[in-house]
Amino acid sequence: MKRIRGTVVDVWEEDIYPGEVYVRGGRVVKVQRGEGGGRYLLPALVDAHIHIESSMLIPSRFASLSLPHGTVALVADPHEIANVLGLPGVLWMMMDSSATPQKVFFTAPPCVPASAHESSGAVLTPEDIKELLSDPRVVALGEVMDVKGVLEGTPELMEKIRLAEKAGKPVDGHAPGLTGEALRRYFSLGISSDHECTTFEEVKERAAMGVLLLLRGGSASKSLDLLSAGGRRALCTDDLSAPDLSRGHMDRLLKEAVEWGADPLEAVEMASRIPAEHYRLPVGLLRPADPADVVVVRDLKDFEVEAVFVDGRVVARGGEALFELPPYLPANNFYAAPFPTTEFIHPVRGPAEVRVIRMRPDNLYTDEMSVELKEGQSLPDPSRDILLALCMDRYGTGKYSTAPLKGTGLKEGAVALTISHDSHNIIALGADLNDLAAALRRVIEMKGGVAISRGGRVLSLRLEVAGLMTGEEPHLVAERIREMERELKDMGMMLTSPLSQLSFLSLTVIPRLRLTPAGVFDVERGAYVEAVRTSL
């Protein structure tokens, strides 16, 4: 019988005490008070909501960076790959994730495409959702992003929610900015969580309805500052880049939660017992007969992870994974035609009144503003921080659109990528049309990935799995992404997490203006609008 000695963080008795965890056959036999002390023994830490694809790493490579940071389990929403490859893409994620010790659970994505205004590569039908929900690894219906469809009672969406209810599995929410009667109606249909809160008022209104609040500490969105608003809460990342993942995962969220005023025991509960109960996850919570999942940390301030046990076996120690990376087979769906020249991209010329998408530096919302171009003026104009954004269909239709965009600070060059939520068409941004064309050409040549062009010099990363992820060595991928983000910063980029934030520019369910291959979409109006309003 194996003994793990330390200071037990007991999320059931809500107590912290010296003790020993006895393990046999991969399970906890007993937890005994008395002997021990020093290092702290935590239950399995759970990221309650994450899109693995946003790391640009396939699940098995993600695990090799994540597990050393104490993240024993994930609730992964695979709607990114589902939008590209459909049900086979989700099954691919499940297969690859099963090849490591990390316990990856999934949700069945109900909104593929995210809304009727998206042009994805696949559709998930109620039959697909029923098949997924029958798998024990699928623990919930994924985030219901089509708020309009819920409020209007779209039959197919209602059928997917009913299928989850029939399977006895919860339904994840996604209700940014929703309030009042519309909010009540949205959650009255059985939706039970939300990770999109950005204000204290939103947290309190949802908490009063009994909604589980998933507070984020990811690369693109952060809401741990809302911890003091109360309610039933769990911790998640939502989207996490490989560079950020290499620096920390649930260990970092615990540290930040404590820094925001959470009691350490309360923080551990939000990262273990609460999500495990909500999703009924078969993970170890330091009870007799539980799987012997134990995270050993140095203290309850920095939560530096010393070792991670999964089913009684040491799988990470001292920040390093102790398991081999499995082989994998790439899968893709990419049919964008070769990109010709800058003649394909037209600048916006004055005189004209132009509708500009304004990005915010630290969250995913965008705003609308008007700019008047006089005779002789044109866009892109980096001196005014107004660049040209482009979105091109990757699935063979040939559609593309452009729009002026402000708020990035980019002074030169261009960037293009095929991570473009949720349909994952090509999104690009340029201060210079030649660089914009060069970045687009490289992404198309690679059949998916990220490319930065600066004065004709191109820096790129190929993403051979769905144009979203790679199976290359994860530390090297993280360093490559860091290099690209440093290059963007050197080019003037002001966004906090540039690649992550740019990847949301097309998502037609987050206010306000979005760019798709069909044009500029106003989320609040639910309609496309002209980028160039009038010629003066």
Image (cartoon, helix red, strand yellow):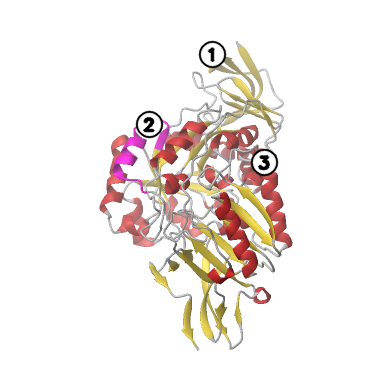
Image position of 17 (left or right of 365) = right
Query: 286 above or below 143?
Result: above
Residue identified by numbered label 2: 135
Q: Residues within 10 Å of mark 2 (few under 14, many from 20)?
A: few
Circle 2 sits in a helix, a strand or a loop, which is it?
Answer: loop
Q: Position of residue 139 (x, y in %)?
A: 41, 35
Q: How far apart, in angstroms, are the residues tagged by discs 1 and 2?
A: 25 Å
Total marks in image = 3
User: Which residue is at a point 42% across and 73% down the rendered structure image?
Assistant: 529
Q: Of circles 3 and 1, which is in front?
A: 3
Q: Quadrant of the N terminus?
A: top right
Which label was assigned to residue 25? 1
Give, as a three-letter code, the residue at label 3.
Answer: Ser
Q: Is residue 46 visible in this depiction of the protein? A: no
Dividing the picture into quadrants, the one containing residue 325 is top right
Q: Position of residue 5 (x, y in %)?
A: 66, 20
In the image, 30 versus 358, the foreground residue is 358
Q: How far apart, in angstroms, are the residues tagged by discs 2 and 3?
A: 31 Å
Question: Which region is colored magenta?
Answer: 123-139
